[in-house]
Image (cartoon, grey):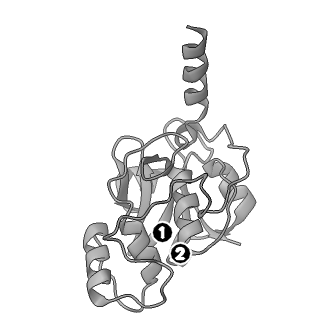
Amino acid sequence: MRRLLYILAVLFLLSSCHTGKFAYRFKPKPATSNGWSFTRPSSVPSTTTSKASNSDLSRAGSKLGVSVSSSDDARLFIESSSWIGVRYRAGGIDRNGVDCSGLVYAIYSRVYSKTIQRCSSADLFAKYCSRVSRSSLRQGDLVFFTTDNSGSRIGHSGIYLKGDKFIHASSSKGVIVSSLNDAYWNKHWYSGGRVR
């Protein structure tokens, strides 16, 4: 019984996408280490290549619901498309389940080879980002929101794609693409963030 209560308490504390109050305090291992489960389905092209075929871009755009061209950040769009539909899991960082800041961590490490400490969305904004206005967002910038549960504090994050669309891990729907113009996200907009 004591063990069950401990597990429930840990799960409650790991729900960073709702409150932003708890920060993960461990140092991430490289994405290639045996400690992380960053396996790529065979149907997903490598994002380390500088050129992507038009069919790769078309497939990625179709899954993301945006039009992707050769002038877009192909690595970002192809990698992001491979996460669509992954279920939500508090504290998760892989395709077995992921939360909002875990998705940012995973995509940034794979696409941009940037090691961002695994932390809450609020800490992610404070420690790693320069503020960016909504009108100045670029592909790969981060987007931050308050939530109904976080009050005026940051409680959710995602990655900006293009055309007011961003990818994020929804606690109810898993990894999806949403629009900044949706009533909920428009109401809860906090700021854009450019990773330094």
**Residue that label 1 marks:** 160
- Residue at 52 percent across and 65 percent down: it is 107
Which corner quadrant of the image does residue 194 belong to? bottom right
Q: Position of residue 104 (x, y in %)?
A: 54, 60
Q: Which residue is mark 2?
A: 137
Quadrant in which the N terminus is drawn: top right
Locate residue 141 relative to residue 43 in the image: left or right: right
* Label 1 element class: strand
Dot 1, how many residues are within 10 Å of its Cα: few (below 14), some (14-19), or many (20+)? Answer: many
Q: What amino acid does circle 1 point to? A: Tyr
Residue drawn at 71 percent across, 63 percent down: 128
Classify 72 as above or below 21. below
**Above or below: residue 151 compared with residue 103:** above
Is residue 12 found left or right of 42 in the rendered image? right
Label 2 vs label 1, nearer the camera: 1
Nearest the viewer among 143 and 61 is: 61
Quarter of the image where one finds residue 58? bottom left
Q: Are marks 2 and 1 in contact (CB under 8 Å)?
A: yes
